[in-house]
Amino acid sequence: MESIPIHEDIKLKQVKYQKRIENHKQSLKNLAACDIKYMHYNVIIVLDWTSTHLFWKLDDKSPALRFDRVEMTVFEKIYHES
């Protein structure tokens, strides 16, 4: 089986993250009861690779991802404090 999506509340430790962790654990138990023994997760976190701007417009109006070091530093500080 290739992964069960991990809810953003868990990744960001938001309001319902503990309940969502329990739900996730139950989903894994349910799969195990169906004799699914292996689970694969890709650990590239979307929050990391998207950096800060998903739909940046270049001068010619074509879209691009854009990294902004200041915004990423602020995000990292807030994320790690929560």
Image (cartoon, rainbow, N blue to C red):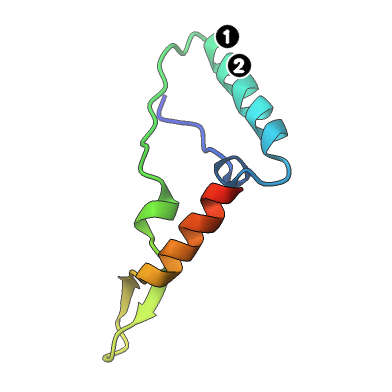
Q: Residue furthest left?
A: 60
Q: Residue furthest bottom?
A: 59
- Classify mark 1: helix, strand or loop: helix
Give the CA distance from mark 2 to mark 1: 5 Å
Q: What residue is rendered at 67% in x and 28% in y?
A: 23
Task: From the viewer's side, name the closer residue of 80 and 38.
Answer: 80
Q: Is residue 44 above or below residue 76?
A: above
The amino acid type found where label 1 is placed reads Ala
Q: Position of residue 55 (x, y in %)?
A: 40, 74
From the viewer's perspective, is 73 left or right of 15? Answer: left
Q: Which residue is mark 2?
A: 30
Q: Is residue 59 above or below residue 63?
A: below
Q: How many marks?
A: 2
Task: Using the rendered view, name the quadrant where residue 58 is placed.
Answer: bottom left
Q: Position of residue 48 (x, y in %)?
A: 39, 53
The amino acid type found where label 2 is placed reads Asn
- Callout 1 crowding tier (Cα within 10 Å): few <14, some 14–19, many ≥20: few
Q: Which residue is mark 1?
A: 33
Task: Using the rendered view, name the quadrant where residue 65 is placed.
Answer: bottom left
From the viewer's perspective, is 34 left or right of 22? Answer: left
Q: Is residue 27 above or below residue 44?
A: above
Query: Image quadrant for the N terminus?
Result: top left
User: Are the two marked residues, 2 and 1, in contact with CB atoms closer than 8 angstroms?
Assistant: yes
